[in-house]
Image (cartoon, rainbow, N blue to C red):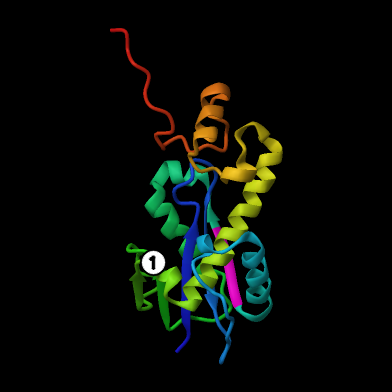
């Protein structure tokens, strides 16, 4: 039975879309060092990324910040996972999903696994692809909006990012449905 690992990146970011990846390993595939992408250095992640895209059936998909604002982050995350699954060449027999929420996909059995990207190699591989793709996109966006420091914070709500928002305001890429800054106090 073909098992697919699925994960997403960017769910907690204040900017841009949420990116999901799906990975199917070839028979007897082994790749040492696979774990949660957030626990890997960028250099190690890039090396593993290359091996995964060269040897596995994989796909990456995104739900945009506009979709996030329209349907909410959970539904957008799951939508991006379904889009990634749609793009695979092989039909899965089972889907292993990082996290605790997922909507059934084409009646294919699935299981959500909390911290699955640190427990299962195929989910870890999907984690690496999703994070690498999203980080690459954030590097490109940084060139367009350098004042927010997205080359370093990747759109997450760091103190520096929030200070830049306070100074420059929100841009088109920010998720408008997120509470990015505390509300202003009213004089009335």
Measuring from the top left, give residue 50's x and y in whole percent: 68, 71
List the single residue furthest toward the top: 188
Is there any visible trace of residue 177 in the rendered image? Answer: yes
Q: In the rendered view of the protein, which quadrant contains the C terminus?
A: top left
Q: Residue 112's image quarter?
A: bottom left
Which secondary structure, mark 1? loop
Residue 185 or residue 57, whichever sits in front: 185
Nearer-the-camera pick, 8 or 67: 8
Q: Is residue 60 magenta?
A: yes
Q: Which residue is mark 1?
A: 115
Quarter assignment of residue 167: top right
Quadrant assignment for the N terminus: bottom left
Q: Position of residue 113 (x, y in %)?
A: 35, 70
Instruction: Count residues near mark 1 (Cα–Cα under 10 Å), then give few for <14, some for 14-19, many for 20+.
Output: some
Q: Residue at x 33, y 62 (%)?
A: 101
Q: Which residues are magenta?
A: 57-61
What residue lies at 43% left-to-right and 33% top-to-bottom?
A: 180
């Amino acid at each position: 039975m073909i098992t697919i690992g699925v994960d997403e990146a960017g769910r907690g970011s204040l900017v841009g879309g949420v990116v999901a990846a799906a990975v199917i390993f070839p028979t007897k595939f082994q790749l040492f060092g696979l774990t949660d992408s957030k626990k890997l250095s960028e250099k190690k992640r890039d090396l593993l990324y290359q091996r995964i895209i060269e040897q596995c059936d994989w796909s990456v998909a995104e739900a945009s910040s506009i979709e996030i604002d329209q349907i909410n982050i959970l539904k957008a995350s799951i939508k991006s996972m379904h889009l990634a699954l749609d793009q695979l060449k092989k039909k899965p027999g089972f889907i292993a999903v990082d996290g605790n929420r997922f909507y059934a996909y084409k009646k294919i059995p699935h299981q959500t696994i909390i911290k699955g990207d640190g427990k299962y190699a195929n989910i870890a591989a999907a984690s690496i692809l999703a994070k690498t793709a999203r980080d690459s996109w954030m590097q490109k966006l940084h060139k367009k909006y350098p004042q927010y420091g997205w080359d370093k914070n990747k759109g997450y709500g760091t103190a520096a990012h929030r200070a830049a928002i306070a100074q420059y305001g929100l841009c088109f890429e920010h998720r408008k449905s997120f509470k990015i800054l505390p509300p202003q106090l009213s004089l009335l």
